[in-house]
Image (cartoon, rainbow, N blue to C red):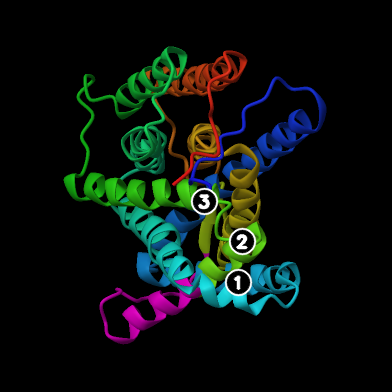
């Protein structure tokens, strides 16, 4: 059985190069659309929306967008769907419910940028998991990339500069990191037989059902408002960020993200997704006037340098003839 990695790094020629290029474009599109979620959610929190309601409505709209595509991609293979009910439940619980609800809980307590950067220590967790579980020891350039990204994280948090962080917000962001790592690992798994679009749609649908159940038993904090929100200094109707959260930052983001994971693998896909941090910080500046400091911007550049180093590390592994995919279980 193929492992969760399928990290197919290539030299950029032929069909494999086209797959990688397509995967990178899809991963960047996913990161860009995911990056909008913090700003839109933050604008709703200011009017009385709770993270629970925001996550539930976002997931429900995203599922409505993705499910028709997921059913079409399945092409009547209901046996494959039944065989993967456990996987879809876990994906919905961790990669959908866990990642977005915990992230929104973090954003309610701290700024979008730091919350995103704590969540996106997930790529380092992915590298560690692949090493521990499958013996995929990262090469020196990949390790250098991880260290650069970690150094960038320290600078973005600006702890040395005396920045104060809400302890509860940090804890929620770390929980979101666990969900994000699961998202990258499951996305890269070819062994389930599920089309990537079906995996995204099923995960969103199961995640919505799980959150709905938690809301019914009053575990998920619920609350909403129809008051106008402020985005980019302008007042707009409440439903505008709600629709954008569901369609763009959920439906489109998950569909492109899962497709990218199948083409790139868990490790490379996770590091390219760090672009979401840069996009999220930029969107937070534009939409909710949260401007990072110079030190935090330098940290963002280090994180991008880490992504480049990881990409180069993957290419060197392939050039040396070492296996990077198809680890047999």
219 displayed left or right of 272: left
Q: Crowdedness of circle 1 by 10 Å Cα count: few (<14), some, many (20+)?
A: some
Mark whose residue sits in front, 3 or 1: 3
Mark whose residue sits in front, 2 or 3: 3
In percent of the image, x 25 and y 77: which residue is there? 219
Asked if marks 1 and 2 touch (Cβ < 8 Å), the reply is yes
> Can you name the residue that lies furthest to the right here?
14
Q: Which mark is residue 193?
A: 2
Hey, which quadrant is residue 263 in on the image? Answer: top right
Sooner in the amino-acid sequence: mark 3 or mark 1? 3
Does the stretch in magenta take in 315?
no
From what the image shows, is residue 326 above or below residue 155? below
Disc 1: which residue: 80
Disc 3: which residue: 1
Question: SS at mark 2?
Answer: loop
For the magenta stretch, what is the residue range? Answer: 206-228
54 displayed left or right of 80: left
């Amino acid at each position: 059985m193929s492992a969760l990695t399928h990290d197919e790094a290539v030299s950029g020629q032929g069909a494999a190069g086209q797959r990688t290029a397509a995967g990178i474009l899809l991963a960047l599109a996913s990161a860009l659309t995911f990056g909008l979620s913090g700003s839109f959610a933050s604008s709703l929190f200011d009017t009385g929306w709770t993270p629970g309601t925001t996550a539930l409505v976002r997931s429900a709209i995203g599922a409505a967008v993705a499910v028709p595509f997921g059913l079409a991609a399945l092409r009547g293979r209901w046996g494959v769907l039944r065989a993967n009910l456990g996987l879809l439940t876990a994906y919905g619980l961790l990669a959908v419910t866990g990642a977005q609800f915990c992230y929104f809980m973090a954003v309610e307590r701290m700024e979008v940028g730091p919350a995103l950067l704590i969540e996106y220590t997930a790529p380092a967790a992915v590298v560690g998991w692949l090493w521990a579980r499958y013996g995929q020891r990262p090469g020196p350039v990949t390790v250098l990339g991880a260290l650069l990204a970690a150094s960038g994280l320290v600078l973005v948090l600006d702890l040395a500069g005396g920045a104060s962080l809400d302890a509860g917000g940090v804890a929620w962001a770390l929980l979101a990191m666990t969900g994000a790592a699961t998202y990258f690992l499951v996305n890269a798994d070819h062994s389930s037989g599920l089309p990537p679009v079906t995996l995204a749609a099923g995960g969103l649908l199961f995640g919505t059902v799980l959150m709905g159940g938690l809301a019914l038993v009053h575990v998920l904090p619920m609350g909403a408002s129809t008051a106008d929100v402020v985005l980019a200094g302008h007042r707009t109707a409440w439903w505008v960020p709600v629709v954008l959260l569901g369609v763009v930052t959920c439906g489109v983001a998950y569909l492109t993200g899962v497709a990218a994971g199948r083409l790139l693998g868990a490790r490379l896909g996770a590091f390219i997704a760090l672009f979401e941090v840069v996009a999220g910080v930029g969107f937070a500046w534009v939409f909710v006037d949260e401007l990072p400091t110079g030190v935090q911007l330098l940290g963002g550049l280090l994180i991008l340098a880490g992504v480049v180093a990881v990409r180069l590390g993957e290419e060197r592994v392939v050039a040396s003839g070492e296996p990077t995919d198809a680890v047999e279980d």
